[in-house]
Structure formats: C-alpha cells, structure tokens
Image (spheres, rainbow, N blue to C red):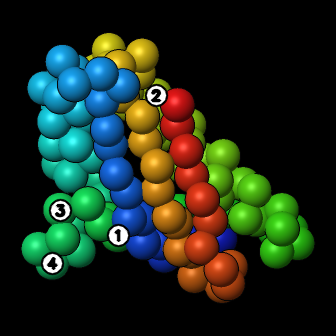
Amino acid sequence: MSKSHAFQLAYSINPLKKIHEPEADTARAHMRKKMGWTPADDLQTTLLGDIQLASGTLEEKRREARNLMRKQIRDAFKALDVDHLVTFTGSLMVSDLKDAIEVEVP
C-alpha cells in the first residue's frame, strides 16, 4: 500500500557547456511550470509537491523517493531533448523521511 508524502525540492540545473544555457533555461522553466509541482513563494528553484511511496523501512522509502524523482526529471529532460546537455542537482526533503536526499541527474 502506498502513502502520499509532501516534499520540497531545491535544485539547480546547469548546462554541460556554456553554449547550452538556452536548453538549461528551457529545463528550468519546464520544472517550474510543467511538472505539476508548486514553486515555493518567489523561490524559482524550490518546488513543493506530493510523492507516493510504498510501505517499507525508512531507507527503502528514501531510496524509492530518490529513484522516483530521478525518473520523473530524467523523463522530462529526455522529452525536452536536453538530457545530454544539462545536469540536475537537488536536495529533496520528504515528510517523515528525516534528512535531505541528494538527487542528481547527469
């Protein structure tokens, strides 16, 4: 049985090369407007949302949260055709899961 958990994701999207800054801007805009998550007040790189996690140990839930977030971001970047041009680094806080979870998408 899965349970909904609130999350806060603070992130940075950077181009692999300076020439790909427009693609990084596209990815940033997509994160803010199209992922279904809510920007936190005026913080452009902090998003709020909910994530469904299966029952399990604290470590299993943390691993699942990281994997689900990475998959959603990776899929979005592939759809935008920027997955080979940008990197994503984030800090994910999920309710009831204690410490921040590092999320990276190369």
Q: Which of marks 2 and 4 is nearer the N terminus?
A: 4
Is 65 situated left or right of 72 in this image? right
Mark 3 vs mark 1, foreground winner is: 3
The answer to which quarter of the image holds residue 84 is: top left
Q: Is mark 1 on a helix, strand or loop?
A: strand
Please name the residue that numbered disc 1 is placed on. Answer: 48
For this orientation, the residue located farthest to the front is 18
Which residue is found at the position 76% from the left and 65% from the top?
61
Q: How far apart are marks 2 and 3 (CA)?
A: 21 Å
Q: Mark 4 points at which residue?
A: 41
User: With respect to residue 2, does 69 lie above or below?
Assistant: above
Discs 1, 4 touching: Cβ within 8 Å? no
Whether pointer 3 and pointer 1 mark residues with C-beta atoms closer than 8 Å, the reply is no
Q: Picture coordinates of residue 91 (x, y %)?
A: 50, 64
Quick one: label 1, few (<14), some, or many (20+) residues within 10 Å?
some
Check the image and report above or below for 87 versus 22: below
The answer to whether residue 66 shows anywhere in this view is yes
- Would residue 67 be found to the left or right of residue 88 on screen? right
Looking at the rendered image, the quarter that the N terminus falls into is: bottom right
- Mark 2 neighbour class, 10 Å CA radius: few under 14, some 14 to 19, many 20 or more: few
Amino acid type, callout 3: Gln
Q: How far apart are marks 2 and 4 (CA)?
A: 26 Å
Residue located beneath label 2 in the image: 75
Amino acid on which disc 4 is placed: Asp
Disc 3, SS: strand
